[in-house]
Amino acid sequence: MEQYIVKGGNPLVGEVEIGGAKNAALGILAASVMTSEPVTIENLPDVRDTAVLIQAMESIGTKITRIDRHTVMVNASNIDSMTIDDGYIKKIRASYYMLGSLLGRFGTAQVALPGGCNIGSRPIDQHLKGFRALGAKVEVSRGMISAQTDALVGNHIYMDVVTVGATINVMLAATLAVGKTIIENAAKEPHVVDVANFLNSMGANIKGAGTDVIRIKGVERLHGTTYSIIPDQIEAGTFMFAAAITKGDVMIRNVIPKHLESISAKLIEIGCEIEEFDDCLRVVAPRRLSNTQVKTLPYPGFPTDMQPQIATTLALSEGISIVTESIFENRFKYVGELLRMGANIKVEGNTAIIEGVDGFTGAMISAPDLRAGAALVLAALVADGFTTIDDIKYIERGYEDFPEKMRQLGACIEKVETDRDIQKFKLKVG
Ligand code: EPZ
């Protein structure tokens, strides 16, 4: 079984390059089938979730040519099926974007109900409500969602909750609807804006992405484009916390500092120094960090995808910290693993009460989901002795070359498969 093995103790020092945003990439890949002309997507992260979506797109006849590791050319001129049901697609959340894109272009789509990280019940009612408001007949049965219409017609849609997925999905379908759509209470995340910018570069007419009201004037057709995906806010944030927890000094390159403001603000509050440049950030953690309170919120609030990383860091900071998760109800599963490493954390409902301890000890732990898995790697980087982390398939869903990038900063981490590999690693690092 593939695992990471880590020997803790090294402060991270050096430079790291951030890749393209996974969650923008998933929306953009799905949107790329909305034209029959070729689309080139640059800065595409080479992670498992994008690979799975590409495979699903290929399964309906999309031709995808990899130009280099981070660039693909998508040709959706010969799509021969509107049904996506391959075994893998159920494992990712973003499969639902193929509903919006296929429904928009062809007026019909059938996609297997989405899976994704088990971080809560994750309903899709707002997606379905949006499609219905645009005039589609939507049914969920036998594990499939089917949507169909003779013509999509623009409408005024109020989202009952702020949802990234439904905002993007309705935006995709509405792009090719007849007339005007207004999405109120829209999500404002950077990846929502990036998908809107991508669609606009294909000839869509979308205004207001990044605010809570998005206005879309339907267009008849979209054309080809070449587009470069924004840097990944969460990968960047994860390395910022990796610098913080290890008392390191890391220059994080290829980022948009504005997207990282809520993360930088918290790091400064607990004692880090942050230097901001045009497209990079330096994080220095000169001493033991202090406690704080944090609540996850939709953008521009503190991201739920950074909650495990900050909680893990606070578990080693001075004093008592409170972390409240307000987006997903099941996102503290990693706490049990941190307890095995010596953390002192009590979870009550959606709140974690964290009493900082002086250190963690290495243990055998498992990644319960993507971001929690990354946070456990951060814990392992500072733990006394060796830690093995199982279920790294979750981490690989969203982090490209995670151990390699950590190693480049001085971390002692390796991906291993067998007990022999583990012994070899232990002998090598002593
Ligand atoms: C996206 O998930 C991301 N996934 C998640 O990334 C991220 O945690 C989340 O947004 C929040 O930022 C992708 O982009 C593929 P939501 P999504 O719809 O779209 C409720 C990661 O680690 N809701 O914004 O599924 C929902 O239950 C991950 O990269 C409804 O009630 O999240 C949640 O409480 C995991 N009805 C809240 O809204 C709906 O129809 C926000 O969910 C849809 C959502």
Image (cartoon, helix red, strand yellow):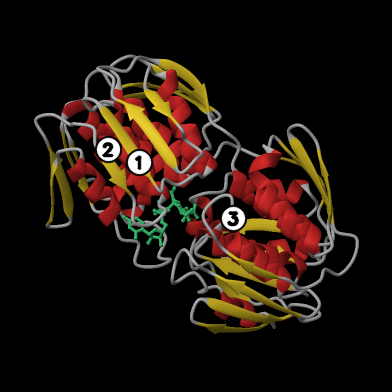
- Label 1 to label 2, Cα distance in Å? 14 Å
Q: Amino acid at mark 3?
A: Gly
Pointer 3 residue: 301
Residue in view at x 26 percent, y 25 percent: 176
Count of numbered circles in the view: 3
Which x, y percent locates residue 370?
A: 51, 58
Query: Dot 3 lies on which element?
Result: loop
Q: Nearer the viewer, mark 2 or mark 3?
A: 3
Q: Which mark is residue 183?
A: 1
Q: Quadrant of residue 302?
A: bottom right
Q: Is residue 101 above or below residue 400?
A: above
Q: Give the residue number, with chain letter if any, for mark 2.
A: 100
Q: Distance of mark 1 from mark 3, alpha carbons?
A: 20 Å
* Label 2: few (<14), some (14–19) or many (≥20) C-alpha neighbours in 10 Å: many
Give amino acid for label 1. Answer: Ile
Instruction: Please report the residue visible at 48 percent of the width from the left and 50 percent of the height from the top.
Output: 397
